[in-house]
């Protein structure tokens, strides 16, 4: 019997450290070990946002990951990396797909994600996965509908029937198609549709599914820094908000990250911190305003997911980007208290 996570440390953050890893798409054990050891020195990390790529817990070496995760970390498993990988081969892949075969493949995909949760929990003897973040793929544009709310509800009904050993099923919202965003980066179901599904699922099955907002993706959807606040307020209104992750974006195309890109841009410059991106819209003021729009202490988790550019960035920069962003969050929270 796997014990459930009993208490959360609200002063610490979930970190999508795979995005700043020197081995995002390659594998060098020595550099990854240095990177992980430096992450373990950051006392503000509650746990990692671990990427599920579609088959195993780690894209290169499950055992390596198990041996190098901090035993005190409480983690979140995100299924977006594997989802995007599948969409490259099948544009209809997803739990909301109008094509039955593609939807069934997505259900199998999540069954493999469950196996990874079990692998991780068995290694530590307790539940180490706070939440499993799922998506309402495939992509919809204003002129081409591949995903429907009713089919997402049907798929999710099956998934929540499985024993997740205390891990919460969380819909990770992405930029949906609208008049501001006719050609979305991800283009999954709208926030309203996802909220409707969560409400119906929880009422019908007495489950506790929730919703996670990513700051940058909500900005991309509205092309406005008020986007995350609008999404947060809608989620709070329906009592489904449980996660908040800070990734940045920019409206300026003259930089490494590109305009309105979903590339997890670090925050804008603040005080004398070394690792920042001056053109990022994710400023201290905008982060503070976002936090003020919600009761962050009521969230199941909050964190950051950032990408260190350029690709040959040093390990010091890769860890420093995360360290400085967590300090910035601490300062933003102190302004609200």
Image (tube, rainbow, N blue to C red):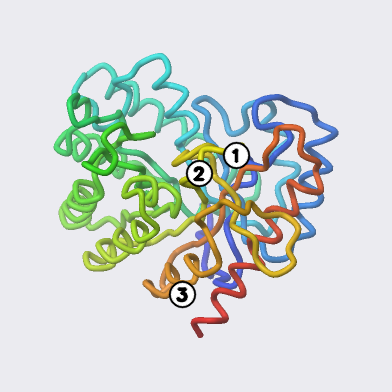
311 to the left or right of 285: right
Which one is closest to the eye, mark 3 or mark 1? 1
Q: Position of residue 111 (x, y in %)?
A: 40, 31
Q: Quadrant of residue 87?
A: top left
How much space separates mark 3 and mark 1, taking CA atoms? 35 Å
Q: Which residue is mark 3?
A: 297
Give the label on residue 61, or none. none
How many residues crowd mark 3 within 10 Å: few (<14), some (14–19), many (20+)? few
227 to the left or right of 248: left
User: For the point 35% across and 39% down, which residue is it?
Assistant: 135
Callout 2: SS: loop
Which one is closest to the eye, mark 3 or mark 2? 2
How much space separates mark 2 and mark 1, taking CA atoms? 7 Å
| Earlier residue among tags 3 and 2 | 2
- Give whichever of 4, 182 is nearer the camera: 182
Q: Position of residue 307 (x, y in %)?
A: 62, 43
| Contact, mark 2 vs mark 1 (Cβ under 8 Å) | yes
- Give whichever of 98, 56 is nearer the camera: 98
Q: Quadrant of residue 21?
A: top right
How many residues crowd mark 2 within 10 Å: few (<14), some (14–19), many (20+)? some
User: For the point 17% across and 57% down, which residue is it?
Assistant: 203
Rendered view: 184 above or below 232: above
How many residues crowd mark 1 within 10 Å: few (<14), some (14–19), many (20+)? few
Callout 3: SS: helix
Which residue in the rendered view is the most extreme toward the bottom? 337
Q: Position of residue 261 (x, y in %)?
A: 47, 38
| Earlier residue among tags 3 and 1 | 1
User: For the point 39% across and 51% down, which residue is it?
Assistant: 219
Q: Which residue is mark 2?
A: 252
User: For the point 25% across and 40% down, which residue is it?
Assistant: 189
Q: Which residue is mark 1?
A: 255
């Amino acid at each position: 019997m796997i014990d459930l996570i009993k208490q959360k440390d609200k002063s610490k953050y979930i970190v999508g450290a795979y995005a700043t890893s020197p081995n995002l798409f390659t594998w060098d054990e020595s550099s990854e070990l240095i990177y992980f050891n430096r992450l373990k020195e950051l006392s503000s990390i509650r746990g990692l946002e671990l990427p599920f790529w579609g088959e195993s817990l780690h894209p290169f070496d499950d055992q390596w990951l198990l041996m190098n995760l901090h035993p005190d970390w409480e983690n979140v498993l995100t299924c977006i990396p594997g989802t995007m990988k599948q969409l490259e081969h099948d544009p209809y892949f997803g739990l909301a797909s109008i094509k039955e075969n593609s939807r069934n493949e997505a259900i199998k995909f999540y069954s493999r994600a469950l196996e990874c949760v079990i692998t991780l929990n068995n290694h530590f003897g307790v539940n180490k996965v706070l939440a499993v973040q799922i998506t309402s793929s495939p992509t919809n544009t204003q002129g081409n509908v591949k995903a429907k709310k009713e089919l997402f509800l049907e798929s999710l009904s099956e998934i929540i029937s499985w024993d997740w050993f205390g891990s919460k099923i969380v819909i990770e919202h992405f930029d949906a198609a609208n008049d501001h965003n006719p050609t979305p980066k991800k283009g999954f179901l709208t926030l309203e549709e996802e909220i409707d599904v969560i409400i119906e699922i929880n009422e019908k099955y007495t489950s506790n599914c929730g919703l996670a907002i990513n700051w940058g993706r909500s900005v991309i959807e509205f092309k406005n820094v008020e986007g995350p606040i609008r999404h947060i307020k809608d989620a709070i209104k329906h009592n489904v908000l449980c996660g908040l992750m800070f990734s940045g974006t920019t409206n300026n195309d003259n930089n490494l990250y590109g305009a309105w890109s979903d590339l997890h841009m670090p925050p804008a410059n603040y005080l004398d911190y070394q690792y920042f991106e001056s053109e990022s819209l994710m400023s201290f003021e905008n982060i503070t305003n976002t936090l003020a729009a919600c009761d962050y202490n009521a969230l199941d988790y909050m964190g950051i997911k950032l990408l260190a550019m350029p690709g040959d960035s040093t390990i010091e920069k890769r860890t420093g980007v995360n360290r400085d962003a967590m300090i910035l969050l601490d300062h933003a929270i102190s302004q609200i208290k």
